[in-house]
Amino acid sequence: MSFKNQENKEEVKIMALALTTENFEQEVVQSDMPVLVDFWAQWCGPCRVLTPLIDDLANEYKGKVKVCKLNIDDAPEVATRYGVMSIPTVMVFNDGKVAGETVGVVSKEKLVSMFSSLIKE
């Protein structure tokens, strides 16, 4: 989902929320909605392949699922805490706990299937 800026009619695209060590607890663990977290790094080619899919999900599921990205080079302690050994790793959190995980480049459909049953309508 994207929307048009009323003044200049250009399309505004929502991007995934950038996570840090400082905001991870509040944005993910304490969230009242499911959270998809993409663990990535700038130097990771497969991570860059996944980025457009992650941003699409941020647009399509705004208000239903919080879609986030965590750069493991900037927050290695968070990646270690959740056992991230390879990237890209995508985890879905629900009620503060990991509810699903996938490693590597996967389809948008696979990502959606990880959280679709958790969405509260």
Image (cartoon, rainbow, N blue to C red):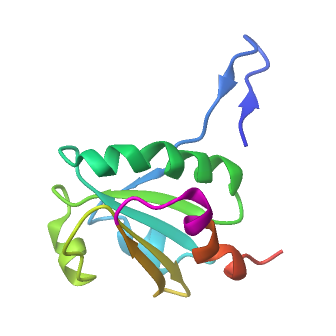
Q: Which residues are magenta?
A: 104-111
Classify 80 as above or below 48: below
Residue drawn at point x = 38 percent, y = 45 percent: 49
Residue 1 visible? The answer is yes
* Magenta span includes 106: yes
Image coords of residue 7 (percent x, y): 76, 13
Classify 15 as above or below 23: above
* Magenta span includes 38: no
Image coords of residue 48 (percent x, y): 34, 43
Which quadrant of the view contains residue 23? bottom left
Give the position of the C terminus as an image quadrant: bottom right
Residue drawn at point x = 43 percent, y = 79 percent: 101
Which quadrant of the view contains residue 64? bottom right
Image coords of residue 84 (percent x, y): 24, 75
Report whether 2 appears left or right of 73. right
Q: Give whichever of 51, 59 is nearer the camera.
A: 51
